[in-house]
Amino acid sequence: MAWMAEHLGERIDPRRLLTGARSVVVVADRYARPGARAESLPGSARGRVAKYAQGRDYHDQMRKRLGLLVDRLRREYPGQGFRLFVDTGPVLEREHAARAGLGFVGKNTLLIDPHAGSFLLLGGLVTTLEMAEAKERSGPATSPTSHCGACTRCIDACPTRAITEFSVDARRCISYLTIEHEGLIDPEFHEAMGDWVFGCDVCQDVCPFNSAEHAGARAGVNPAYRSRLDRGGGSFDLLEILGWTVTQRQERLGGTAATRASLSMIRRNAAIAAGNSVVRDQSSALLDRLREMAGTEAEDPLVSATCRQVLARIDPQRRCHAQE
């Protein structure tokens, strides 16, 4: 994730984003209801998509609403400067959100609103307006342990052991591997990736602040983020994904943040999930498809190489041939 180091000066000092900046306004949009756990899919050859990417693309949704806010502020405060951001500019949204009182940074490194959980999308604006500092209703951002306490559920539940206290090793994180990593995925992580084909919700699903008992009554969800995916509850048939064309990927994922992963990447992820399904459910159809894709010269090189990785782990027939 080398891009995180780019424009470091702007990330540290918002005044480099907007000359004369005096304040940062941060907003949060809730995309899933606390207690709405992503169910595992036993006996089903399907691949799951993280909750935040199942609805309309939050970049577009939040940018439109923030744009309306900026337009209004410009009318009311002529001569003042404004610049909005939604996860695309060099801004430390999480840190600004914690300082603005929207929540605290948990052990899984996500912003957590103690009143309503962590299924939050962040955006905001930098402005030359002088504003009073927000009262922190969530406790000091400098004392995150005051909320997580001794809880280690996110650390214990992470399938790839990517999380240590207040730190995530992106090289091991399923979200990074399935969304940002463009090459082959180390077979070390294949089994742990389970049926995830885009992102991962595990560390949030186990968090006590996301339990229905804790925050369900207070947690409204922006309807724009309701799942636009098929009847599979935020999942797709793995055989279908493995056969996707560029057009089919756009038809199925268009308008969601899941388009972040290229066709090659989403099919690569599906091949790994298919291998796990073969081991779990003994799916002959998936095994045959993986064998076919591994040996087809016309196949995408990343996908075919991934299929060979998968088969080397799960396919007794292939292992026997390799030993001969």
Image: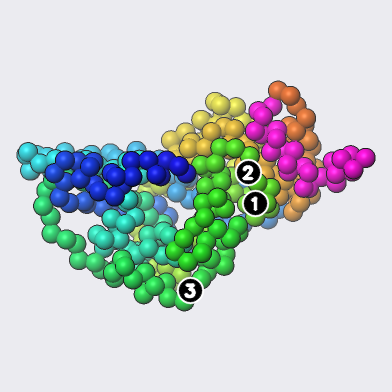
Judged from the image, the secondary structure of the residue bearing numbered disc 2 is loop
Numbered label attached to residue 93: none
Task: Quickly name the residue at label 2.
Answer: 185
Q: Position of residue 235 (x, y in %)?
A: 57, 46
Q: Residues within 10 Å of mark 3 (few under 14, many from 20)?
A: few
Name the residue that disc number 3 marks: 151
**Residue pictured at 48% horizontal, 73% vertical:** 151
Describe the element under mark 1 as helix, strand or loop.
helix
Stretch of the chain drawn in magenta: 299-324
In percent of width and height, residue 121 lies at: 36, 51
Residue 303: within the magenta?
A: yes
Looking at the rendered image, the disc whose residue lies closer to the viewer, 1 or 3, is 1
Distance from Cα at disc 1 to Cα at disc 3: 25 Å
Query: Dot 2: within a 10 Å radius of its alpha carbon, few (fewer than 14), some, or many (20 or more) residues?
Result: some
What's the amino acid at mark 2?
Ile
Q: Looking at the image, is mark 3 or mark 2 earlier in the sequence?
A: 3
Q: Secondary structure at mark 3?
A: loop
Q: Work out which quarter of the rendered image holds the C terminus and state it.
A: top right
- Outermost residue toward the top? 298
- Residue at 78% x, 44% y is 312
- The residue sitting at 37% across, 48% down in the picture is 223
The correct choice, above or below, for 106 with respect to 50 in the image is below
Q: Residue tagged by mark 1? A: 189
Marks 2 & 1, CB-CB < 8 Å contact: yes
The verdict on residue 306 being magenta is yes
